[in-house]
Each structure stands twice: as C-alpha cells, then as structure tokens.
Image (cartoon, rainbow, N blue to C red):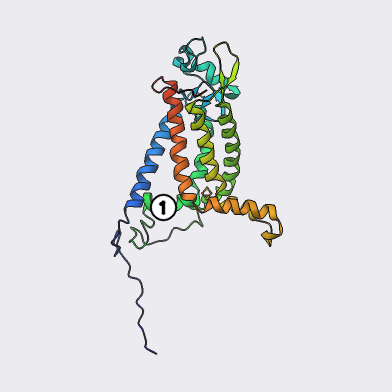
C-alpha cells in the first residue's frame, strides 16, 4: 500500500485564502442588510409618532403598552379620518393596551412605545443560531468566511461572558411566540375600518395584506426556530410514538430547513410594514381600498 503524506492546514493571515469564488459577497451583503435594518428600526423606534393609520399599527410598536403623543400628533387629524375630528393622538390611544405614560416616568429617559417592546424581538433575532453564523462573519470576521484567515488567533467560543448570553435564545423564543399572537390580532384588526362617525365595518386595504403577510413571514421564521424544534420534539425517547407531536415536529423541521430565508424575508417585511404604516400616516402613500 502506497504511503501518503498528509499536510496540516496552514495558518493564514487575516483575509488570506486560496478560495477563488466571491467569498466576500455574502458577509458584505449581511453587513449592509443588517446595518440598514438596525439604522432604520432605531430611527423609527425613537419617532414615537406615525405608527398608526386607522386600524393599522406598525409591528415595531405593537403591542403598544403606553402612549405619550407628540404635540403634533395631538393637533393633527389622522390621515385615515380626515373628514372627522379624530387626531393621530386619538388613534394611538385606541391602539394602546394600558394607558398614558405614567407621571413618574423620568424626564431624562426618552419615551416611545416601541422602545418598551423592541428589546424582546431584538434579543430573539440577535441570539438566533442562523443570525449568529451570519453576523459573526459579517461584523467581527470570526471567521470572515469558511477557509479564509481570521484577524485573531484565539477562539472566543460561547462558554463565557459575553457570548454565553446567547443561550438566552430559548427564553427569547417564548416571548417571540407571544408577539406572533399579538401581531396576528393586529393583522385581523387591519380588516376592520372605522367610519368617520365612529362605527366599524369590514374592509380590505392594501395595508391589510401588508400586515397579514408580515405575521405569516414572522410566524414562519419563529416557528422554524431551532429551539422550537427542541420544544416541540423534546421530552420523548421516540418521537414516532406520538403521531401529533411527530407531525408538528415535521412541520417545524420543514420551516427550519429554510430558516435563513425566512429570517431575511421576515426582517425585510417587518421593516417594510413600518414604512407602509408610517408613509400612509404621513399622507405620502395612499392605502388603496379593495373593499
Ligand atoms: S434559531 Fe433562529 S430564531 Fe431560533
């Protein structure tokens, strides 16, 4: 038998590789996509205005626990009810669960209904197994891509602070599931239009579909989570012994197979849903009514 010699992999300098494909394209696209989303969502979260349009509410602000309308929102008529005296502030109040911002709210602390709830979906995305793989490459080049030299010699791992906090993901999933229920409720509300005299009627606008698609994409992303597979399929030695559980597990696994795709589609659409509601509220876009 011929004796072969095996050479050990060579240590490469940062960015060095023998790859000839466009290996840098994916991390660059992830970097640009994430940066754009984080920039826009942070800006939108601090606006505390134009997050409702009639029965629509931006997913960045839902559930709206408290409200504290801007002076402009107090004075300006809602674009969805221009023939009535309903203001944007009235509209925001109607979408709020608990009531006005409490008097003890510290003056130095900026207030926005979005800032109260966005940390939960933010944590869910930040700790997602798919996103970790993507942003470790794109933001701190660890590694920058497969077979490409890293800028550091040590291995950080996820066994100590701060990265051990990534293990919060399974708990963030529980919160994300609650959000899906709330956003589904919002999407249904998007089919109930309020007449200028205050009565309600069934209707369909382009925005109704925007909000339905939003919850479908977010649901596909959330239900396909790796932790969801464990939640659905765990606690049994043989999954096949429970037909229902096995079916649910197969559904979750099916979504999980395209988890990266659902991650990006849902990220884009949740941002677009906010843009849609915002621009309708500002009178820049028209919400065409189909019914
Ligand atoms: S692994 Fe991506 S959402 Fe859980």
Could you say which quadrant of the image residue 175 lies in? top right
Relative to residue 168, is residue 204 depicted above or below?
Answer: above
What residue is rendered at 36% in x and 57% in y? 145
Is 249 placed left or right of 164 in the picture? right
Decide: few, some or many residues near mark 1? Use Cα within 10 Å; few <14, some 14-19, many ≥20: some
Q: Which residue is mark 1?
A: 136
Q: Quadrant of the N terminus?
A: bottom left
Horizontal and vertical percent for residue 48?
Answer: 47, 24
Relative to residue 178, is residue 229 depicted above or below?
Answer: below
What residue is rendered at 71% in x and 56% in y? 242
Horizontal and vertical percent for residue 291?
Answer: 52, 22
Is 28 placed left or right of 242 in the picture? left
Relative to residue 217, is residue 6 depicted above or below?
Answer: below
Q: Is residue 133 visible?
A: yes
Looking at the picture, tell me which residue is in the foreground, 22 or 162.
22
Is 49 placed left or right of 175 in the picture? left
Horizontal and vertical percent for residue 40?
Answer: 40, 34
What residue is rendered at 35% in x and 51% in y? 27
Looking at the picture, tell me which residue is in the foreground, 84 or 118.
84
Looking at the picture, tell me which residue is in the foreground, 289 or 183.
289
Relative to residue 93, is residue 9 depicted above or below?
Answer: below
Horizontal and vertical percent for residue 38?
Answer: 41, 38
């Amino acid at each position: 038998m011929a004796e072969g010699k095996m050479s050990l992999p060579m240590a490469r300098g940062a960015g060095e590789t023998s790859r000839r494909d466009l290996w840098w394209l994916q991390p660059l696209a992830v970097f640009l996509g994430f940066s754009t989303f984080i920039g826009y969502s942070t800006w939108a979260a601090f606006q505390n205005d134009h997050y409702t349009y009639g029965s629509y509410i931006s997913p960045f602000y839902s559930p709206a626990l408290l409200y504290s309308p801007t002076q402009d929102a107090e004075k300006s008529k809602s674009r969805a009810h221009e023939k009535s005296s309903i203001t944007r502030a009235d509209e925001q109040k109607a979408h709020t669960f608990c009531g006005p911002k409490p008097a003890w709210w510290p003056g130095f602390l900026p207030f926005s209904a979005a800032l109260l709830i966005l940390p939960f979906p933010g944590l869910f995305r930040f700790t997602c197994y798919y996103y970790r793989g993507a942003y470790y490459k794109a933001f701190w080049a660890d590694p920058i891509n497969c077979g490409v030299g890293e800028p550091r010699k040590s291995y950080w791992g996820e066994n100590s602070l701060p990265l051990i906090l990534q293990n919060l993901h399974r708990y963030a999933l529980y919160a994300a599931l609650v959000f899906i229920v709330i956003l589904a409720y919002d999407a249904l509300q998007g089919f109930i239009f309020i007449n200028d005299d205050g009565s309600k009627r069934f209707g369909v606008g382009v925005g109704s579909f925007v909000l339905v698609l939003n919850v479908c994409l977010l649901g596909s992303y959330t239900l396909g989570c790796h932790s969801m597979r464990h939640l659905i399929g765990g606690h049994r030695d043989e999954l096949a012994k429970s037909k229902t559980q096995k079916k649910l597990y197969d559904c979750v696994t099916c979504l999980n197979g395209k988890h990266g795709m659902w991650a990006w589609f849902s990220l884009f659409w949740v941002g677009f849903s906010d843009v849609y509601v915002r621009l309708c509220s500002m009178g820049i876009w028209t919400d065409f009514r189909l019914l």
